[in-house]
Image (cartoon, rainbow, N blue to C red):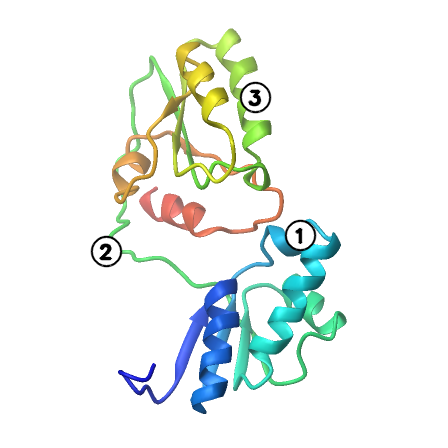
């Protein structure tokens, strides 16, 4: 911020919103924050929720405006007295339609490929996905479950075991997700608290 000396700063996701907001306050730079979702630290409640909301109060205190991508998150912040200033609810962040252009639907009638893109963690519904994949794979051996994303929690042993059983195909973290989307019949996201996530928008744009 010192080097670039911006006229205004737009931050999004929790750490940039909190730390960026603090830095902008110290440097007297106008800033706008974008709340893309509550995140697990708030969703899970308890002491982590209280700490996170306290940090948000400090980080967003002098913001020119705070954007929310859904009314539920907006109401939660207002009801918990995190914000006093200007707020707006906006219709999401959108996706890059040059990177995610329409693709012909895979038409191999012999197999069905499902795709999960996201961090491998409980809040993304990964436990439910694993159980569903095990049940479906027993009944329909030509159904394949592909997972793309880094592991946030201790799932390595379970992933290794499910790969050995040929229940899932784990691709790890990838820079280019479009190449996986265009080969899939459906994207699945059993997340506990996300709505219309970017992954689903990218998949819809791809067809």
Q: Which numbered mark, 1 or 2, is in the foreground of this view? A: 1
Q: Which numbered mark, 2 or 3, is in the foreground of this view? A: 3
Counting the numbered discs, the total is: 3
Spatial CA span between label 3 and label 1: 24 Å
Look at 44% across and 41% down and name the residue there: 118
Picture coordinates of residue 20, whole percent (x, y): 45, 74
Spatial CA span between label 2 and label 3: 33 Å
Would residue 193 be found to the left or right of residue 15 on screen?
right
Residue at image mark 1 = 43
Q: Secondary structure at mark 2?
A: loop
Would residue 49 be found to the left or right of residue 153 on screen?
right
Look at 33% across and 16% down and name the residue there: 109
Would residue 40 be found to the left or right of residue 93 on screen?
right
Residue at image mark 2 = 98
Quadrant for the N terminus in the image: bottom left
Q: Secondary structure at mark 1?
A: helix
Asked if residue 115 is positioned above or below residue 46 in the image, the reply reads above
- Closer to the chain start, of discs 1 and 2, is 1
Q: Secondary structure at mark 3?
A: helix
Quadrant for the C terminus in the image: top left
Labels 3 and 1 touching (C-beta < 8 A): no
Labels 1 and 2 touching (C-beta < 8 A): no
* Structural crowding at the residue carrying mark 3, measured as other residues with C-alpha within 10 Å and reported as few (<14), some (14–19) or many (≥20): few
Picture coordinates of residue 141, whole percent (x, y): 43, 9
The image quadrant of residue 164 is top left
Look at 63% across and 85% down and name the residue there: 85
Would residue 21 be found to the left or right of residue 111 on screen?
right
Q: Which mark is residue 132?
A: 3
Look at 53% across and 23% down and name the residue there: 130
């Amino acid at each position: 911020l010192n080097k670039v000396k911006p006229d205004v700063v737009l931050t999004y996701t929790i750490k940039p919103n909190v730390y960026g907001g603090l830095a902008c306050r110290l440097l007297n730079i106008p800033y706008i924050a974008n709340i893309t979702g509550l995140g697990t630290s708030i969703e899970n409640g308890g002491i982590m929720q209280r700490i996170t909301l306290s940090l948000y109060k400090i980080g967003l205190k002098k913001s020119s405006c705070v954007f929310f991508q859904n009314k539920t998150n907006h109401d939660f912040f207002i009801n918990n007295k995190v914000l006093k200033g200007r707020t707006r609810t906006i219709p999401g962040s959108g996706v890059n339609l040059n990177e995610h252009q329409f693709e012909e639907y895979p038409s191999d009638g012999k197999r069905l490929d499902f795709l999960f893109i996201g961090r491998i963690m409980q809040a993304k519904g990964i436990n439910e996905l694993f159980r569903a994949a095990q049940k479906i794979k027993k009944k329909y051996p030509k159904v394949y479950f592909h997972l793309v994303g880094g592991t946030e929690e201790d799932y390595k042993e379970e992933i290794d075991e499910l790969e050995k059983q040929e229940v899932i195909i784990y691709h790890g973290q990838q820079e280019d997700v479009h190449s996986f989307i265009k080969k899939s019949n459906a994207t699945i996201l059993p997340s506990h608290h996300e709505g219309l996530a970017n992954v689903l928008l990218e998949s819809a744009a791809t067809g």
